[in-house]
Amino acid sequence: MTSFLMEPGIPTIDDALGPLIETLREGADPAVRAFAALTLAKCGRSAVLAPLVAALGDTEKVVRRAAAQSLAGIGPEAVPVLVAALGDPSWIVRYRAAEALGMIRDPRAAPALIGMLGDPEDHVRFMAAKGLALDPGGPATDALIGRLDDRNPYVRRMAAEALRNAPTPLGDAVASRIRELSPGG
């Protein structure tokens, strides 16, 4: 089945990496750049990590979202570069890096996401809480409790959701209180 792929002249994944990375970086159409990001994730090569992290700061939301999804799809191998991206000066990059880390659900990301609960940007704190909500409990609990009085109502709500999901008696208590406060609850 794979013997025809070894024929001379048949391009390999490695042959496609360069053009895909170039398209991601320089393509005129945001939809094409987003498609390049999604395709790069399927290549299974560590060489795609840096270009995908760079795309987290793209000018177009569709490309940033595709880059985050792609990095999340790569999985645990992407955790170190995503943790490093949390230090980017752009809140948009930090937001998308936190999003991807949350989707990966790797325990190594929890300390970094906990740290991002203190980010000056509301969007980043929200995404860090959301990421922790996907895998709640442990050391995140105290940090999430601290966000229940965040100045942003969306961050407060996401922290409460994360605590509600925690496999602890606190999670049960928070879930009960959310039901009480919900309309019709």
Image: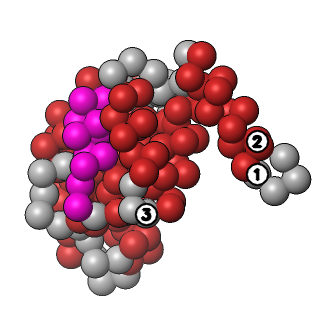
- Say which quarter of the image contains residue 49: top left
Q: Amino acid at mark 3?
A: Asn
Whole-percent x, y for residue 18 in the image: 18, 56
In the image, residue 165 sits, relative to residue 10, either above or below, namely above
In the image, residue 97 sits, relative to residue 74, either above or below, namely below
Q: Between 111 and 77, which is closer to the camera in this rendering? A: 111
* Count of numbered marks: 3
Q: Residue at x 19, y 49 (%)?
A: 86
Quickly name the residue at label 2: 179
Q: Say which element carries label 3.
A: loop
Task: Please indicate, yes or no, whether residue 48 appears anywhere in the rendered image.
Answer: no
Q: Say which element carries label 1.
A: loop
Q: Reading the chain from its start, which is encountered first: label 3 or label 1? A: 3
Secondary structure of the magenta portion, mostly? helix
Per the model, the C-alpha gap separating discs 3 and 1 is 18 Å
- Say which quarter of the image contains residue 123: bottom left
Quickly name the residue at label 3: 152
Disc 2, disc 3: CB below 8 Å? no
Q: Which residues are magenta?
A: 110-120
Q: Amino acid at mark 2?
A: Arg
Whole-percent x, y for residue 154 in the image: 50, 60
In the image, residue 70 sits, relative to residue 37, either above or below, namely above
Per the model, the C-alpha gap separating discs 2 and 1 is 5 Å
Categorize mark 1 by other alpha carbons within 10 Å: few (<14), some (14-19), many (20+): few
Whole-percent x, y for residue 82 in the image: 22, 43
In this picture, residue 14 sits left or right of residue 70: left
Q: Residue at x 45, y 21 (%)?
A: 137
Categorize mark 3 by other alpha carbons within 10 Å: few (<14), some (14-19), many (20+): some
Q: Which mark is residue 182?
A: 1
Q: Residue at x 84, y 47 (%)?
A: 185
Disc 2, disc 1: CB below 8 Å? yes
In this picture, residue 181 sits left or right of residue 54: right
